[in-house]
Image (spheres, rainbow, N blue to C red):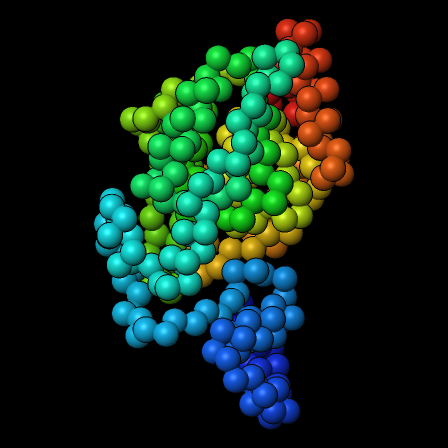
Amino acid sequence: MPDKAKQVEALLRQRQQEGIYDRVTDAEQLAQQLTDDVQRIGPDRHMMVGFSADPLPPDSKGGPRPETQADWERRNNFVMRQITYVMANPVDKVEHLDGNIGYLKISGFPPPFISGRRFAAAMDELAGTDGLIMDLRGHRGGNPEGVALLISYFVDQRTRLNDIWDRSTGTSQQHWSVDKLDGKRYGSKQPVLILVDPDTKSAGEEFVYTMQALKRGTVIGEHFLAFIPSRRAINPITGSNWEGAGVIPDIAAAPDKALGVAEDLLRRRLEEGGALAAAGQ
């Protein structure tokens, strides 16, 4: 947003005039100092400065979606590559709770060439459950293609999920569910509850917002503000997105209580044989 950009520029120039950056002698420390200063203007954690000791090629955006790791690396900058590889294993935990309830803890959405096998293994293990709790508390973000891949396990037919408009290129790309999956499709019938907290970030927000818009997930947790970096998502159902307003839970719960609330609600509904009222389930 132009007003925020002007505020950031003014702050950085002020800090420079004060000699703050002259005192920093390490490149990575300078990158962190700049990141801290930029984020003082607003809480958007996408705004960050990275450092690479090697020259970086220009970003290559637009064109066909990358299909391989090599293609993806050529299309993304150093900072994004480093963030993504930190999330190399996005599945933190898969469990079977009492009452044949599945539990899936997801911490990131790397591109499908990283997340595909791990999501497939998790969904194979959870395929026979009567209901599922997906825990995205503390989620670190990720990649739209990774989001689309996991959502695909919860719809029965090809579904348009989001349109992503890139501000830097002026182009828009549609994101659809994936027809052929490596794991067992969970489908659209069993209830799904999704746990969130103020640390649910970026691609985690996209996943939660889209599942809620599809009436495929009941969101439990604490309302959090959300931000999108250089791209703007447009949901085909709502005509909008989660930027600024955030994702509003269907059922409010403190982060440390959300799992217990979800278990009680899901177990009660399964015992009664009824559908979840929230989010159309």
Front-lying residue, 164 or 21: 21
Answer with the quarter of the image where residue 196 lies.
top right
Q: Position of residue 41 (x, y in %)?
A: 63, 71
- Picture layout, residue 155 above or below residue 112: above
For the point 36% across and 35% down, the residue is 116
**Residue furthest to the front:** 26
For the point 68% across and 14% down, the residue is 267
Quadrant holding the C terminus: top right
Please indicate whether residue 4 sits to the left or right of residue 174 in the image: right
Front-lying residue, 141 or 233: 141
Answer with the quarter of the image where residue 60 lies.
bottom left
Count of numbered circles on the image: 0
Front-lying residue, 147 or 5: 147
Please indicate whether residue 264 sits to the left or right of residue 22 in the image: right
Answer with the quarter of the image where residue 280 lies.
top right
For the point 53% across and 27% down, the residue is 94
Q: Position of residue 21 (x, y in %)?
A: 56, 86
Please indicate whether residue 79 sits to the left or right of residue 23 in the image: left
Q: Position of residue 118 (x, y in %)?
A: 40, 33
Front-lying residue, 128 or 250: 128
- Is residue 164 among what the camera can see? yes
